[in-house]
Amino acid sequence: MATFACSVADLRPLLGAAVNATAAAEYICSGFDAVSNKLVDATYAIDNTYLLFSAYLVFSMQLGFAMLCAGSVRAKNTMNTMLTNVLDAATGGLFYYLFGFALAYGSPSNGFTGKHFFGLERFPSLSFDYGFFLYQWAFAIAAAGITSGSIAERTQFVAYLIYSSFLTGLVYPIVSHWFWSADGWASPARADNLLFGSGVIDFAGSGVVHMVGGIAGLWGAMIEGPRIGRFDVNGKSESLRGHSGTLVVLGTFLLWFGWYGFNPGSFLNILKTYGETGSYYGQWSAIGRTAVTTTLAGSSAALTTLFGKRLLTGHWNVIDVCNGLLGGFASITGGCSVVDPWAAVICGFVAAWVLIGCNKLAEKFKYDDPLEAAQLHGGCGAWGIIFTALFAKKAYVNEIYPGQGRPYGLLMGGGGRLLAAHIVQILVVAGWVSVTMGTLFWLLQKLRLLRISSDEEMAGMDVTSHGGLAYVYHDENNDQALKNSFMMTKVDGTVFLFFLGRSFVLI
């Protein structure tokens, strides 16, 4: 951080030949230095306060994930999905503290992984303060939350604990090191040897967060297979509707609110000028523009989904609109800081059709994702990476990533080097997550630690694993069958669940 200096030797001649000129110069310089130090302190305080506030906003997205997940599953699995969201944050907190942050940002290091700050040793430093750790932890658990939606309603609880620890402690941190650490092999912040002379501009994580979480969920859901009843014996798709549109809308608005910490907060500081001081334009303006592009992309995607699904199905579906909105946000996340607002509208429009197309493919291949998480975060995240390479504006790129001759968007006249770097990102993220998380889920399946039994799945995990239902459950489509299929009774403090002739004992 730049500081101001006052030199007694330079000031002394300006005070004339007075006998006390030296003392006066020393006095003036001491006061000047004190003011300069206070300004430096104030700058650190303002920037760290901004980062902490952004971290709190991103963390609030966990509540949004919890509400969205709860509303998107059937009522008999509400307690289970709420608990998994709580433990994503708690497990992620411990493992990101022990391993994840060091692997992501432990500089100096090599291009593949960090090597310092395990357990926050020798922390804080000149490079990082505690607010930065908190902010990056909130990103890590967001990736884990995405994955939990894909495998909801049929996954053993122990599998959640294992995959969440592995994802936040190893898989996600390695990816964030590649693209966000100053030492990462594809980072735009590298001092030299930039990938295609550019590095990857994934500002807030269309690839680093959304593709990682989406692809991890894709492998988990594919290896587990669809939920019972999602496809009939002839392979025809059957709707297993979530039990609460209200919770879905509440979760969507909470995520929208938190995204203003996710995208604008990724600047990490606010008190920075572009060019001469005293100007109305600085990093604070770029932060405001980023909030606007985020808003417009989500809004465009929501309206496109609304009318698109109306044309395709004949319905105005609030769940589809919420997912479309979130798809727009996931897409704009990578390029939110380097594109104009008009481009963000295009981003959201295309993202809506990407999501609709991915859902059609999922249905065709009998892929079951209760929250459309892999389609939304994986598919729309990949589109966001391509979008940035097409529409990144030269002036904005040079403000945020200073450097002579740095490539920018292909459609903005910047050539194809940035697009080449971003295609590499899509391939390596997909490959890394597939090898690591795909292998993990396969091993869990082989060890019979991944999927619950069919009896437990039919009864619901709330009663079989979590001590009871979240609230009184009423299935409007199959009420009589439900009454005939299971009942609960309590004898001497022991709860018995009778289901289709079998019994489970809940202590």
Image (spheres, helix red, strand yellow):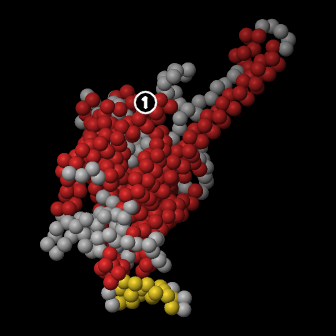
Q: Position of residue 247 (x, y in %)?
A: 42, 58
Is residue 309 among what the camera can see?
Answer: yes
In the image, 71 versus 431, the foreground residue is 71
Residue at x 16% of width, y 70% of height: 235
Q: Residue furthest right?
A: 19
Residue at x 37% of width, y 64% of height: 243
Q: Position of residue 228 (x, y in %)?
A: 27, 74
Quarter placement of the N terminus: top right
Establish if 25 lies above or below 119: above
Amino acid residing under circle 1? Glu
Establish if 479 lies above or below 268: below
Residue at x 40% of width, y 84% of height: 487
Does residue 214 appear to the left or right of 251 in the view shown? left
Q: How many marks?
A: 1
Is residue 447 among what the camera can see?
Answer: no
Residue at x 53% of width, y 61% of height: 93
Establish if 267 lies above or below 101: above
Establish if 324 lies above or below 288: below
In the image, 406 versus 202, the foreground residue is 202
Q: Position of residue 202 (x, y in %)?
A: 37, 44
Q: Position of residue 3 (x, y in %)?
A: 62, 29
In the image, 31 versus 380, the foreground residue is 380
Image quadrant where residue 500 sits: bottom left
* Circle 1 residues within 10 Å: few <14, some 14–19, many ≥20: some
Residue matched to label 1: 399
